[in-house]
Image (cartoon, grey):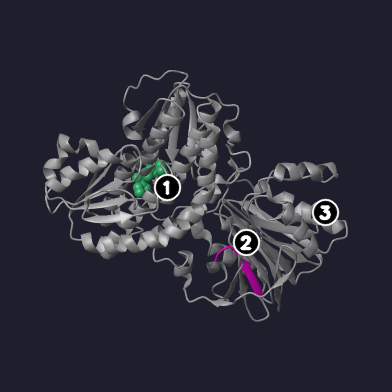
Amino acid sequence: MCGIIGYVGHRPSVPLLIESLRRLEYRGYDSAGLAFCLNNKLQVIKSEGKLSNLENKLNQSEFFLATSGIGHTRWATHGLPIEKNAHPHLSIDGRFALVHNGIIENYGELKEKLEKKGITFSSETDTEVLVQLIAHYVRKGDSILQAISKSLKEIEGSYAFALIECSQPDKMWVGRHSSPLILGLGQGENFVASDIPAFLPYTKEVIFLENEEIAEITTTSYQVYDLDLTPLNKKVTTIKWDIQAAQKGGFKHFMLKEIFDQPQVIRDCLTGRINKSKKSVILPELENFPIPHKIHIIACGTSFHAGLWGKYLLEELAQIPVEVDIASEFRYRKVPLSPQDLVMVISQSGETADTLAALRLAKEKKLKVLGLCNVVGSSIARESDITLYTQAGPEISVASTKAMLSQMLTLLLLTLFWGNKKQLLTSTFLEKAITVLSNLPEILEEQLPVLKNSAEELAQKYAWARSFFYLGRGLGYPLALEGALKLKEISYIHAEGYAAGEMKHGPIALIDPDFPTFALALEDELLSKVVSNLKEVQARGGKIIALTTPEVKVEATDLWTVPFLEAPFNSFLALPALQLFAYEMAVYLGKDVDQPRNLAKSVTVE
Ligand code: F6R
């Protein structure tokens, strides 16, 4: 994910900025850049790829005279990961340089407006609009702060930015909305960064900026304002983490951090894709793409489970027949494919060998391929005819968590998009869906700590188990498969996911008091059937944890209640609950949560 660092002080800023960006490398990036003032002129140096490429361009000794500047690592979300799109971006007059995280949704409109005023753009990024807009207002007579305030009021979307001006090397201006930004306060020097590790060796005194706050920072002072430029008093917090803990955002493991990232993942994945006022889904990538008659979803592991979850939705709400295949099976199965079929490959990494081979097979057969991918510029993203990025940000923990949630959300958006195009969805349904989706980040944010506590209690109670069943029906079935996969891969407890209705066809023979069951008993049209299946388990002495809502009447050894949300939205609470249960179990059993044995993050061999 993109990283920002800004510095004003007394140290040579170029090596400091590079080192700070290096401490953000764990987040992943594909290009990087710096800007700093020298002799009343801005120097902007950028490069594709690793920071060492950027460093190679920074070997002029005069660069080491700079004592301020801004730096950025970019993890491409929309435009290609090329030098032109790397940050910082300059205003047309060369006076301002800006780095930005987030997405400016109305940048097209703003760009058109600025172009009419004769401003030309040198990149295709949304970021450049912001720096040009601020510079435009300054040229018209506004102070820099006024120009920032005016510009931010015109912007829709999310941002964290740092701005410098060529004639004031001891100052920078920063602001945020929906993307994190933190001030670091030093002695005769001040910092700003998207993540605390960037400046942690220099200071532990920080100020967390809130939404729609901006700040003017000098070497010896700072002042935070709201968007109307009313000065604000901010609390200074002392950070107690070391660098490693800070990289994990203070969480004990990357997996836990990534589970807790999920509300933000929902925000990022929805940005620019739902129109809250028109209550519609916007997927510009697919606007001119024919609605498929049939889809073959192909993926591996957790991504396969997301695909299976999507099948239920696409078939029910968009009336598109869907087959879901494990990539390693699909590539060798002689599947009859019709040229009108769409192949959809789902992959977090975009490099999974079997999924990539299936994609190539489909292309050989002249089928169109839609990629649902997290890593921009990955092989699957490049080779698909169309790619929808799932916007989960870098996933570091080997066990996939937030990537699956983002894949499910993208599949839901696709379903709403096609279902609406086919006029299968009522406006009341769409309106409700958009409203629930918009509220989902806050709901999940509130629920995650509660879910974690319950997961911890239950994990301690069931840590003796050597085997687990996970049962669900409908949308609960792929979730059951995923719950079982998470448990086995990080806690090494044998776990099997089953469609609850399938139990009596064999697996129920395993049930006894030592073989517990984790049941997905959330409210949907199949709930009564799940409840009956659980009675069969209980009758054989099986212990049950039932993930359910307060109104449901279900008998279980342990009821794990979550607030009511209608299907399919309740899956976005169930998935984190399953992830947290596996996580707490692994932690309690002392396992290496982020690096489970025998597993690799990206499976690039067959
Ligand atoms: C499980 C897990 C794997 C991946 C699978 C596919 O936690 O991470 O099962 O989901 O290897 O990887 P991608 O999605 O990168 O193709």
Q: Is residue 384 left or right of residue 45?
A: left
Q: Is residue 124 left or right of residue 401?
A: right
* Front-most of residues 142 and 434: 434
Q: What residue sits right under mark 3 in the picture?
A: 136
**Residue 329 shows in the view:** yes
**Separation of disc 3 and disc 2 at Cα?**
24 Å
Going 21% across and 55% down the picture, which residue do you hit? Answer: 557
Find ligand 1 in the image and state its quadrant: top left
**Separation of disc 1 and disc 3 at Cα?**
46 Å
Q: Please, what secondary structure does the residue beneath circle 1 have?
A: loop
Is 194 magenta? The answer is yes
Going 67% across and 77% down the picture, which residue do you hit? Answer: 189
Q: Which mark is residue 565?
A: 1
Span highlighted in magenta in the image: 190-195
Q: What residue sits right under mark 2 in the picture?
A: 211
Is 92 magenta? The answer is no
Q: Please, what secondary structure does the residue beneath circle 2 have?
A: loop
**Where residue 340 sits in the image (x, y, percent)?**
47, 19
Q: Amino acid at mark 1?
A: Leu
Q: Amino acid at mark 3?
A: His
Q: Looking at the image, is 487 positioned above or below residue 319? A: below
Q: Amino acid at mark 2?
A: Asn
Q: Please, what secondary structure does the residue beneath circle 3 have?
A: helix
Circle nearer the N terminus (1, 3): 3
Going 36% across and 52% down the picture, which residue do you hit? Answer: 399
**Residue 261 shows in the view:** no
